[in-house]
Image (cartoon, coloured by chain):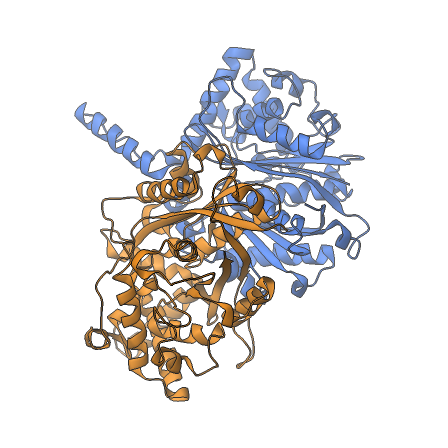
Chain colours: A orange, B blue
């Protein structure tokens, strides 16, 4: 396996783009990536595409990548369409990395794209509900409905939208009981990410928020308020990968991929490390570094408590100390290890199948000193963590990448 | 890149399995592959899964592989969900091969699975229609409808099912005009494949058919009769890949992957080689062989004329000579290069996202001398060709694999 470099990144603003489809969104991201890399489209030797939900939103299945790429005149080369729920784009990046690391191709594009907003909101919600075991969910809902009807009550269906947030709320309460974490800790995380987002022109939400603002926003599932939950969105993000050797032809500022690790949840004993902790350890081992070496991280804050537990799973602090970490400002801009300087999923937004490559794009810009007002000074080593879907209570897919200059 | 071996294969019968979902179908294929390889499930280090259309049929998107694998207790490892229309499973195989060839993992499973039959036939047809540019198709249909209404006629929609067959029919007529090919040539191909299917316990159709039977079956799109068109179906097929070195631990009869090539269509001048010809040439080059060295091939006969043109694209004969090849019995069992001894898509069936791995499973059995009544005697070198989707008149994905003992 040879060393792989990133030489270009591009992304759309994450937003509600009612006037744009996946073709327009992807074109903007790809053109940005190619331009920043100084790579012509016809130099690409393969493309890996991540998308989670277009089938259920637009009816386009099967060849989602080819449909957007041929529009731009990109054809003839291998196109891998991949999905892994919210980790679809990191999975696509992992495959693009594998093509280059294996020695098979020298110049490969990774694209993440998603179009979630639809005039019919039910379509968006149904699509998000497809990131779990749908057959099992339908059976459970049918059983619930039957039980409720037997009791003479109403139906229990239509909860797919908030199911993930119910899960996060339960987790948040459990952490509060066990470790004395408070809802203010979660609010601090959300306030940090919204304020970071205000410095990022790619962010869906660009208004700085205080802890008070976060706590005053509508309650979704106690203790989660709306500002502690990631929104849905539309967008795309693309990256150009080359061999480390080849990178010299394009840039004097390559960013190297030190670890590309993908895993999935499994049945395990309570107390055993979960998939995020396992993948983070593996990534540190492959990269030959530890969490203390990280200068910046972009993590999967689908909700504010998710970010808090990820601090612990990544080893930025001990188990139960996530609250202390945020209290001490360690993960804020200016702290020892800023987390989600982009605004994260909470503020930058979360067009599901685009999130993974957007996280990597952010770290790419941070390590090259190109992150503008949200720049982490002197960042040399960064990590991304992107999780997706859920089966039997654990993430169905989890990708960790470590990058360095 | 190191050499990769196949050590096990398993598949369901391809059929209308109204009582089985993807979990049951996949379990049967995976258990068969593991058992034939003598590999325990916990020895697997990664899984690549191909599926084209479950999102539109069952609502299950995002994590289709994890949902079936966790049911069997397989978790913790990387799971890549990929789709490339009818070439989804060959794409999954290509990724499994890449994992092993790169040196990243030693033991990897490739799974193709599809559940196409649904009580609501419209769902099946809509899913098949998603293997083209859906946005463009919707626009075209809207324009057609508008034009027809302006003329006072009926609507022009609802044609998605037969669109691929209309394309094949037009192609078949063009070959007849140019080269003197006859509808009897196409019927001979269909009769050969149905007769081969009668020897294959995995085939959806197991009734031998004559040229007369094929020509007498209902007309779908002139000159294509029903028996010249592949059916839809349900099924799964799985393969266990290991490094060539590691294969010795499991079997004395490994089958080696000599070439794994994936490409996509592109805009080109008329007369320039299409994607199948380009990929076949590349595969021969990588494997260091020519078409004359093939003992057996499994190709993408979505229709009988498709198989005829594939003869020419693979270099089994010169352009325009496909009819002669079938007349001379070259591609029949007992001929120099039997094609689709399994029955092919026409008779074995075509559960879209399972076809690619089923083709490779067939060649695996043929090269190990385990193909029963349809055995090609002494076969040492085989090829599979799996195409999928369509954008701008050419296959959106095309995979060619060359295997040998």
Seen from the viewer's position, the closer of residues B219 and A311 is: A311
Place of residue A51 in the rendered image (x, y in percent of width and height, measured from the top left): 41, 50
Quadrant housing the N terminus of chain B: top right
Q: Residue at x 31, y 48 (%)?
A: A12
Place of residue A288 in the rendered image (x, y in percent of width and height, measured from the top left): 59, 65
Place of residue A26 in the rendered image (x, y in percent of width and height, measured from the top left): 36, 43
Above/below status of A249 relative to A98: above
Seen from the viewer's position, the closer of residues B132 and B117 is: B132
Seen from the viewer's position, the closer of residues A287 and B312 is: A287
Above/below status of B383 relative to B116: above
Above/below status of A220 relative to A179: above
Place of residue B158 in the rendered image (x, y in percent of width and height, measured from the top left): 33, 36
Question: What is the total number of numbered labels drawn onto the structure image?
Answer: 0
Q: Residue at x 48, y 74 (%)?
A: A313
Q: Residue at x 27, y 72 (%)?
A: A191
The answer to whether A86 appears left or right of B19 in the picture is left
- Asked which quadrant contains residue A365, the reply is bottom left
Above/below status of B104 relative to B271: below
Would residue A115 be seen by someone viewing this image from the given angle?
no
Quadrant housing the C terminus of chain B: top right
Would residue B42 be seen by someone viewing this image from the given angle?
yes
């Amino acid at each position: 396996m040879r060393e792989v470099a990133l030489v270009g990144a591009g992304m759309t603003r994450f937003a509600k783009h009612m006037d744009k489809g996946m073709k327009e969104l992807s074109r903007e991201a790809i053109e940005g990536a190619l331009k920043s890399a100084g790579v012509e489209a016809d130099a690409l030797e393969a493309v890996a595409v991540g998308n989670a939900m277009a089938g259920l939103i637009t009816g386009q299945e099967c060849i989602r990548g080819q449909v957007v790429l041929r529009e731009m005149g990109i054809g003839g080369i291998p196109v891998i369409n991949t999905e892994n729920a919210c980790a679809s784009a990191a999975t696509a990046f992992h495959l693009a990395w594998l093509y280059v690391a294996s020695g098979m191709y020298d110049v490969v594009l990774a694209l993440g794209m998603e179009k979630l907003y639809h005039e019919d909101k039910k379509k968006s919600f149904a699509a998000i509900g497809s990131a779990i075991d749908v057959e099992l969910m339908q059976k459970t809902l049918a059983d619930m409905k039957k039980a409720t009807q037997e009791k003479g009550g109403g139906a229990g269906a239509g909860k797919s939208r908030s199911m993930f947030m119910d899960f996060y709320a339960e987790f948040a309460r459990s952490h509060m009981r066990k470790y004395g974490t408070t809802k203010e800790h979660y609010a601090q995380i959300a306030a940090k990410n919204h304020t970071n987002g205000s410095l990022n022109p790619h962010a869906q939400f660009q208004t700085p928020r205080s802890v008070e603002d976060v706590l005053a926003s509508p309650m979704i599932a106690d203790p989660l308020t709306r500002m502690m939950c990631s929104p849905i969105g539309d967008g795309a993000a693309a990256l150009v990968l080359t061999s480390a050797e080849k990178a010299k032809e394009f840039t004097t500022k390559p960013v190297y991929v030190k670890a590309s690790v993908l895993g999935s949840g499994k049945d395990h004993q309570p107390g055993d490390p979960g998939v995020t902790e396992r993948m983070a350890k593996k990534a540190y081992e492959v990269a030959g570094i530890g969490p203390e070496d990280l200068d910046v991280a972009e993590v999967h804050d689908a909700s504010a408590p998710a970010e808090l537990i990820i601090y612990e799973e990544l080893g930025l602090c001990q188990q139960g100390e996530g609250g202390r970490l945020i209290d001490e400002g360690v993960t804020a801009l200016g702290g020892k290890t800023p987390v989600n300087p982009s605004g994260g999923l909470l503020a930058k937004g979360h067009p599901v199948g685009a999130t993974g490559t957007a996280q990597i794009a952010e770290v790419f810009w941070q390590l090259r000193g190109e992150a503008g007002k949200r720049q982490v000074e002197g960042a040399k080593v960064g990590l991304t963590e992107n999780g997706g879907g859920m089966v039997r209570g654990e993430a169905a897919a989890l990708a960790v990448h470590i990058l360095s200059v």
